Image (cartoon, helix red, strand yellow):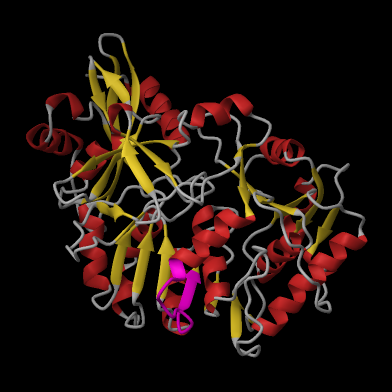
Amino acid sequence: MKDAFNLGDLIDGSQPRQKTAIVDLGGERPPRELSYGELDALADGAARLLLERGLKRGERVGLLSANRSEFVAGYFGIMRAGLVAVPVNFKFPPRQIEFVLRDSDARLVLCDAARRNAVPVDIPALEWSALRPGARHEPVRPAEGETAMFLYTSGSTGRPKGVVLSHQSHLWVVRTRLQGQDASAHRLLIAAPLYHMNALALAKLAAAAHATVVLMPQFSARDYIAAIEKYRCTWLTAVPPMMAMMLREKDLLERTDLSSVRTVRMGSAPVSASLMERLRALFPKATIVNAYGTTEAGPVVFGPHPQGLPQPDLSVGYPHPGVSLRRGLGGVLEMKSPALMTGYHKLPEATRAAFTPDGYYITGDVFSVDENGFHTFVGRVDDMFVSGGENIYPSEVEKMLERHPAVEQAAVIPVPDEIKGTKPVAFVVLKRGAAAAEDELKQYALANAPAYQHPRRVWFLPELPLAGTNKLDRKALARLAETEMTAAGSPS
């Protein structure tokens, strides 16, 4: 990659400008294709447009849009201008969108037409149609630690928190991920939302590598499968629920050529042994990576073993040499790396609580470590609940249930219990054509895990609800469980 100093200036002008940077599947027929020269000019045009509107260095600009090539150009242009990019989860309810824009002190919002009315009337907004290619704009040279972007957490445990990230932190991420490899020949399929670290980090990686991105506006399993074949995609990135939904489309998978895929990278949620096994069968030529990262500390945490030992299926890998890791209280992972956030915007107490006195970020994620140093995700401290004095991590119970031959996906949550305080219940998606009864799965759990982990109720769903980041929406499941238990009772 080029020796960039501004995170918005990753495109190497010495590489072929006519090469396709983005195949935009956002709705036009035929789909638009932007070359690297066109993407670069559009980013420069965005930078000039924002400065012409009177924005000053360090001021914040919101991005409120489904995945579009303009999103990538606008994101780069904001940072080239010395401004701060604030991607906003457009799936948030209106009050949360307004909270993020006001909390970030956004001076202006770049948006698509569908999201224009979600912007408060007193905050200026420009639709993508206002962007025009511009002459070369020399990127601002940021000071050490100068902010490049705010990424807001999902707000699963309260109001979203603005994670403040510097130019240097994510330039380190891009350089580290590309070190020693030429990824320019890859065609990367991105369907996860660009307001989330998973997709945004990959888009930057692709730009720096001079690779091609096939960009979907949002995830649809059948469209995702079709795009792999049509555009000969080599690199897939997704959260595990997206892969599980894709695997349910057996009829389409059987008649689709997926032989181009060489890399499948999953993150942001636990991966089951069943899912890994089925993906290996579907993509026999691909390297399938179970990855780990956080908004606060980036996607570079683990990697291959230095002695070349094979990574266990459910492990997220061996500590990356550029990262310092340790296990804190209760096995919670603590880490230090150049990718760490500056802090949470306007939340000094939360920032202090997120770090140890010697500067390690406290992830809140619990890991086990085997004799070879491979780390395996156990669960989030926030998700862990106590039932009759026993600690239960939902992901452990979910992985166990997903080993049942009829189970496609499982989700476990706590519900109130007069005797035990809380008790586990489960929601299950069955494999197509498979059958299983509630009592069968309860007995399977009793036979394959400690008795206190077995779900006291099992409900069947056609699919699990997903939040805006395509991760499991546990709040929605809690509401559904309350409704079911109110209607039918709650036997223990």
Question: Which of the 4 image quadrants contains residue 444?
Answer: top left
Horizontal side, residue 86 vs residue 274: left or right: right
Q: Answer yes or no: is residue 191 visible.
A: no
Query: Which quadrant of the figure contains the C terminus?
Result: top left
Question: Which of the 4 image quadrants contains residue 335?
Answer: top left
Q: Which residues are magenta?
A: 177-189
Number of marks in picture: 0
Q: Answer yes or no: is residue 413 visible.
A: yes
Horizontal side, residue 155 vs residue 440: left or right: right
Q: Residue at x 42, y 26 (%)?
A: 483
Question: Which of the 4 image quadrants contains residue 334?
Answer: top left
Residue 222, x across and y down, in percent: 43, 69
- Relative vertical location of residue 204 with respect to residue 102 in this rendering, above or below: below
Q: Residue at x 29, y 77 (%)?
A: 254
Q: Nearer the viewer, residue 3 or 453?
A: 3
Q: Residue at x 50, y 51 (%)?
A: 338
Residue 342, x across and y down, in percent: 60, 42
Residue 139 covered by magenta stretch: no
Horizontal side, residue 59 vs residue 377: left or right: right
Residue 179 covered by magenta stretch: yes
Q: Residue at x 13, y 47 (%)?
A: 371
Q: Nearer the viewer, residue 78 or 278?
A: 78
Query: Which quadrant of the figure contains the N terminus?
Result: bottom right
Residue 419, x across and y down, in percent: 25, 9
Residue closest to the far left: 447
Prevailing secondary structure of the magenta residues: loop
Residue 104, x across and y down, in percent: 73, 40
